[in-house]
Amino acid sequence: MMSPVFKDFVAGFGALLDRTNAEAEILRDGAALLRQLVANDDWLPEEYAQPHPARYTQYLLHRDPAARFSVVSFVWGPGQATPVHDHTVWGLIGVLRGAEIGERYALKQGGLAASAPHRLERGEVEAVSPAVGDIHKVSNALDDRVSISIHVYGADIGAVSRHVFAPDGQAKTFISGYANATIAPLDVRRDLLARREIAILDVREEGPYAKDHPLFADCLPLSRLEMEVLDRIPRKDTKIVLYDNGEALVAKARQRLIALGYDHVLELRGGLSGWREAGLELFQDVNSASKAFGELVESSRHTPSLPAPEAKALIENNPDVVVLDARRFEEYHTMSIPKGVSVPGAELVLRARAQAPDPATTIIVNCAGRTRSIIGAQSLINAGLPNRVFALRNGTIGWMLAGQTLERGKAERFSEPAAEGEAEARRAARAVAYRAGVRHIDLQTLDLMARDASRTLYRFDVRTPEEYAAGHIPGFRSAPGGQLVQETDVFAPVRGARIVLADNRGARADMTASWLAQMGWDVCVLEGGFDGELETGPWQAQWPPPPSVILITAAELATKTDAVVIDLAASPDHKRGHIPGAWFAIRAQLPHALPRLPQGDLVLTSLDGVLARFAAPELARLSGRKVMVLEGGTAAWMTSGRALESGLTHAATPDDDIYRRPYEGVDNAKEAMQAYLDWEFGLVDQLARDATHGFYVI
């Protein structure tokens, strides 16, 4: 966020242009304003002072709404220089840090004529324009450190068509853009409609994200960026669009992405407000695209469903009823419908015949809310199961709103299908996938796809996590099919990417692919691959090497009574248990947390210590204090036998990092649960207004 000093400068320059359009007067009075600005080097945010390792960098600081002027910071690393270039508009250059060498040129017959180089020191200002001399070359005068100058131009200079010059005077047109480049909301919408690859990242925490976001925006908080982005956006030249809602997070996120090698990172012009002001649709909650798709399926196919009271009566009075819970086992174990058995979404078609071998048996599919119930029930119907199949209308939310009791701690899991039933499930699922346009490929085709550097390729193993750990094809990530359809934004934030699914039993991949295809994804199913060399173990996220930090062991921390412990764990984890006396803080909000912390050495921790390691260098710069990281994180503290305390006793930042889902747990307010259902009921209309989704229903 820009300082009051800079805001006053912008206001003053705007007033100058309101007063006059005479270039000589603008250059004279504007130079005086710029000298005042660069006289003090204490206002430029760090993210706009970062050099690029290979070339000079140009950051947009302000663009006048009418494009009358723009303010830019130019950052030169040691030895860096511009080519010989012009501007075509008036400009002012003031040195904020270091010094620069300027060389003026004039176009003469036969080439460029150079004047003697001149040195511009800190605090000095000069002008350029077609009227006073417009062609020059600028270089860092210092060979051992960065130099920075602040430029003001009479246009949006990053969008102006200008020229670079060869020694013979030949001109080549260029448009410079900005290192912190922006993209208009309507251009993002065009990319979505054209199905060009694009990743729209909301770098706020999940709590604010869940209140308002574009349909295909993925929540990837600045706090966890390094730890998640490599898996979620595997291709480094993917078009990435970042936004926040005025919290000044985008510039830092962009710098981190560039440092990781991403080279096409843009800022959404105007952020979330810009999207809204462009008249584009905003959605609430999380996994909104998947939930909206589920509502479209029900609206289109009229998926049969039972309200909670009718389902309860059927379960209690009819012994020939099975209840299949399509959620993850952990969710089912927390709370479940009476008679419920855990059969996560992708397992339904494969295993329903084993759970209900008699075609006369009624099947009720439930989840916590609506989406997985609808998709699960419609999967069985699409696959031609002869049984009567119903979704539990509104899931466990509807059950609780009806005043009915849920069971807790249940552990009943699905049965293994007989060979004949599995073969029939495989045939049925293949037929559904064919109707949805899913392609089947072999390993050689997969290799061709993987070598296509112009496309993002996601490879997902849709089996259970236990099967994945026992042996999986190298390069595939564990993504149980039901959750992949439910949380597509989390697993595959690059809209327009390719997806390849693997499953040694076939039916799960085909059914999952059928839904992804209907959601507009370019999706294939891999044939074979499990007869080769497999890797074992659970899926492991990849992240860059953590920075070097000062480590402290749990035993050492236990004796260090003056340490200030900061816990960067997610707020629900912190509340469940943290080191006694530890302060809760969100990493991206550490600048705001520092004034609330007591004096003393700082010790960062997180669940396993990894997030704390990434945050430590930044905290050391911000605080000027000694910063240590608890080796092994809070898990090591617990392993050493030391006690934890619960609750939120010391909060250095608000605990809005995690959105509290009204469909998880059993202690949600009725008003929140009903509001959530009301929101879901309106999603089909929202999809129609948004019109970028590309969904269809077979």
Image (cartoon, rainbow, N blue to C red):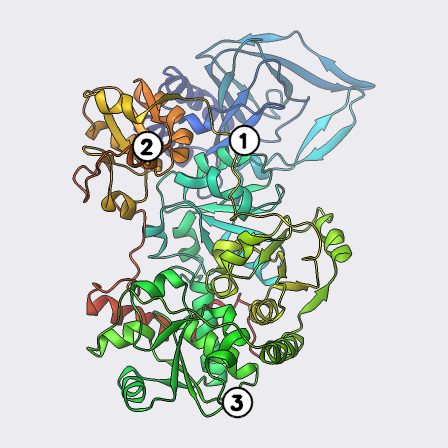
Q: Residue at x 19, y 20 (%)?
A: 562
Q: Disc 1 designates what residue?
A: 259
> Could you tell me residue 519's position as x and y percent?
55, 68
Q: Determine the image quadrant of residue 550.
A: top left
Image quarter (top left, top right, bottom left or bottom right) of the N terminus: top left
Instruction: Give yes or no for contact between labels 2 and 1 (Cβ–Cβ under 8 Å).
Output: no
Q: Earlier in the sequence, mark 2 or mark 3?
A: 3
Residue 160 is tagged as: none
Q: Position of residue 564 (x, y in %)?
A: 23, 25
Marks 2 and 3, how far apart at CA:
54 Å
Amino acid type indicated by mark 2: Thr
Q: Which residue is mark 2?
A: 605
Quadrant of residue 514 within the rendered picture: bottom right
Task: Tell me the residue that label 3 is attached to.
Answer: 386
| Secondary element type, mark 1 | helix
Query: Depth-wise, is mark 2 or mark 3 nearer the camera?
Result: 3
Label 1 crowding class (10 Å Cα cut-off): few <14, some 14-19, many 20+?
A: few
